[in-house]
Amino acid sequence: MPLLVMKFGGTSVADLACIRNAAAKVKREVERGYDVIVIVSAMSGKTNELVGWVEQTSPLFDAREYDAVVSSGENVTAGLMALSLQEMDVPARSWQGWQVPINTTSAHSAARFTSIPRDNIDTKFAEGMKVAVVAGFQGLSAEGRITTLGRGGSDTTAVAFAAAFNAERCDIYTDVDGVYTTDPRITTKAHKLDRIAYEEMLELASLGAKVLQTRSVELAMRYKVRLRVLSSFDDTDENSGTLVCDEDEIMESKVVSGVAYSRDEAKMTLLSVEDRPGIAAAIFGPLAEAGVNVDMIVQNISEKTEGGRAIAVTDMTFSCPVNQVLRARKAMEEARAAGLIRYDDLIEDTDVAKVSVVGIGMRSHAGVAAAMFKALAAENVNIKVIATSEIKISVLIDRKYMELAVQALHDTFGLESA
């Protein structure tokens, strides 16, 4: 039988009525002739509640027990979904991660898949099971302990199962009806895309679009899993939502497919760093060890006078999430105290945002950067930092201008008719 993977996020299974609604969608696919693997998240708000209980019980918690507790939310949903399907006369059963088994590394709260053997689920399909309801977000380490994959891990679970079982498609049901050219809350001109390439979706996800988890898109691109994003709360058909697929499946790509933003960014600048081979490693090594997620990097070479002679120095600017500024400052101060680097001052700007335009059409079209910068200049938006790749241009700007910048760029590239 053809096989389909369907994933339902927390808002899609928020209560029993939502679970029954999701089960009805699964039943419809079974009636169309599919065997189905359903991946479920915990009911909306449940994971946060479980995390709170762990932190109240043990502030310095054992990560293995943390995973044992927080993974239980998905187990509840899986059981309730299987029961709902059985009430609809659909042969279904629930599966926890260890029962499949979903084999992962031992990095608790940030585990990665090592293998997903098919034998157990395939056997049950052969015996007449039509739906396997699998608890997402969790797995089993080589030591036999429950692991979790980090926030958004159920998306990754769904894509991994689609790859392992050669699924025809992986449908991600959420509270939006697809991938939009930008956030509809910022501009009413935002337009739902029928199709988007893996690379574009990966860039949008990494740049702040929260429709899909970044790791799930990476996995889909690697194994060529066709993803469809659609709403749990609308009637769906074969043409609903947005299909995330290979570039070859898209007839003609627009130059820019979307505008993404990240509100909570910070810009940090090390002034007058000694300019020598290895200085970048001396700066960004300690930042990496401290768990700081560095994004945009700009280096400016200059000179200063010291002891009556001119010496080469550099100002090193980088961006990071605003909640990692203290960690970054501590890492730099410790590196200076240890003699690894020398700098005159560390300047922080915690009131910036990142705005990006993304599109695979940029590869073959010149002038995108010029059009972007001209549009921002027309709105009096000053650019602090610029970073580019083959299909992306990102800028750091003052946070108060973020929504204005998104709207201006959306209009400039004509995305309302994307």
Image (cartoon, rainbow, N blue to C red):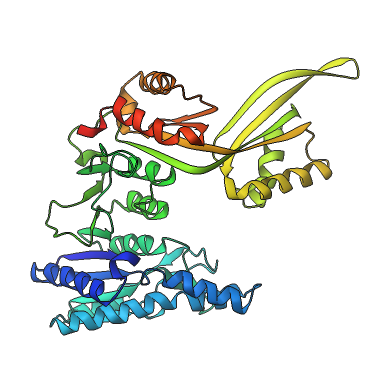
Q: Horizontally, is 86 left or right of 392 in the view?
A: left
Q: Toward the viewer: 165 or 250?
A: 250
Q: Residue furthest left?
A: 32
Q: Horizontally, is 54 left or right of 184 in the view?
A: right
Expressed as whole percent of the image width and height from the top left, the position of residue 166 reads 25, 61
| Residue shown at the point (31%, 22%) measured from the top left | 365
Q: Horizontally, is 168 left or right of 281 in the view?
A: left
Q: Residue furthest right?
A: 307
Could you say which quadrant of the image residue 157 lies in? Answer: bottom left
Depicted 220 relative to depicted 106: above or below? above
Depicted 300 relative to depicted 125: above or below? above
In which quadrant will I find the N terminus? bottom left
In which quadrant will I find the C terminus? top left
Could you say which quadrant of the image residue 158 lies in? Answer: bottom left
Expressed as whole percent of the image width and height from the top left, the position of residue 316 reads 66, 31
Q: Toward the viewer: 346 or 251?
A: 346
> Is residue 127 among the parts visible in the rendering?
no
| Residue shown at the point (64%, 73%) measured from the top left | 59
| Residue shown at the point (64%, 46%) measured from the top left | 325
